[in-house]
Structures are given as structure tokens and as C-alpha cells.
């Protein structure tokens, strides 16, 4: 587990906005990684919406939100449309 102040490992990840390199893509910013087990589940949807409602507060703190899941990118896109 990575602790506050420790270096984040370099990763290349597929997202709904294309491929990005972490942490390089967010250099100079804070970011929050939040994981959910599956798209379209009630609790995950509620948590996702709660983060969205506070998105501007995170942005004011120079912080981006990154959701993690093992589901396919296509599923993420459809889930966001559904929400």
C-alpha cells in the first residue's frame, strides 16, 4: 500500500478518455483514486454520484478524481451515460 508522501508507481491505464500515464498525467496536482467493484451496482453508483457532486470542491484544491474498476471501458462509458 502506498502511503502519503511515498512515490506513486508509474502505470499506464486505459480510461474513458483514452490511455494515460500515472502519475505523470497529473504532475503538479493531487489526485484521489477511488475503487469500485462493478459498474451499475447501487452502492457504487451512489458513491460515484457523491464524488461528482463534490468535483468542483476537489478542483479548487488542485485535486483530480480517478475511479478504478476491473470492468471494461465500454461498460464504464455506458454506466456514466446511465447515471
Image: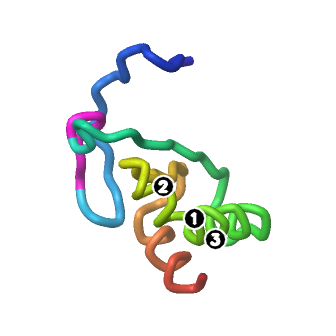
In the rendered image of this protein, does residue 29 appear above or below residue 41? above
Q: Report the side of 46 relative to 21 (left or right).
A: right
Residue depicted at 53% across the width and 57% down the height: 71
Distance between the Cα atoms at labels 2 and 3?
A: 14 Å
Quick one: label 3, few (<14), some, or many (20+) residues within 10 Å? some
Distance between the Cα atoms at labels 1 and 2?
A: 7 Å
- Percent position (x, y) of residue 5? 44, 16
Which of 21 and 70 lies nearest the eye of the viewer? 21
Provide the major secondary structure of the magenta segment.
Answer: strand
Whether pointer 2 and pointer 3 mark residues with C-beta atoms closer than 8 Å, the reply is: no
- Percent position (x, y) of residue 79? 55, 76
Which residue is labeled 2 in the image? 58
Which residue is labeled 3 in the image? 49
- Percent position (x, y) of residue 73? 41, 64
Which residue is labeled 1 in the image? 54
In the rendered image of this protein, does residue 51 appear above or below residue 82? above
Distance between the Cα atoms at labels 1 and 3?
A: 9 Å
Whether pointer 1 and pointer 2 mark residues with C-beta atoms closer than 8 Å, the reply is: yes
**Residue that extends furthest to the right in the rendered view of this protein:** 43
Residue depicted at 50% across the width and 84% down the height: 81
Amino acid at each position: 500500500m502506498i502511503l502519503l508522501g511515498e512515490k506513486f508507481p508509474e502505470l499506464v491505464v486505459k480510461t474513458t478518455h483514452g490511455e494515460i500515464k500515472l502519475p505523470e498525467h497529473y504532475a503538479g496536482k493531487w489526485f484521489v483514486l477511488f475503487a469500485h467493484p462493478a459498474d451499475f451496482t447501487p452502492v457504487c453508483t451512489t458513491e460515484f454520484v457523491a464524488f461528482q457532486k463534490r468535483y468542483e470542491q476537489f478542483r479548487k484544491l488542485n485535486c483530480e478524481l480517478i475511479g478504478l474498476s476491473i470492468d471494461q471501458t465500454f461498460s464504464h462509458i455506458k454506466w456514466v451515460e446511465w447515471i
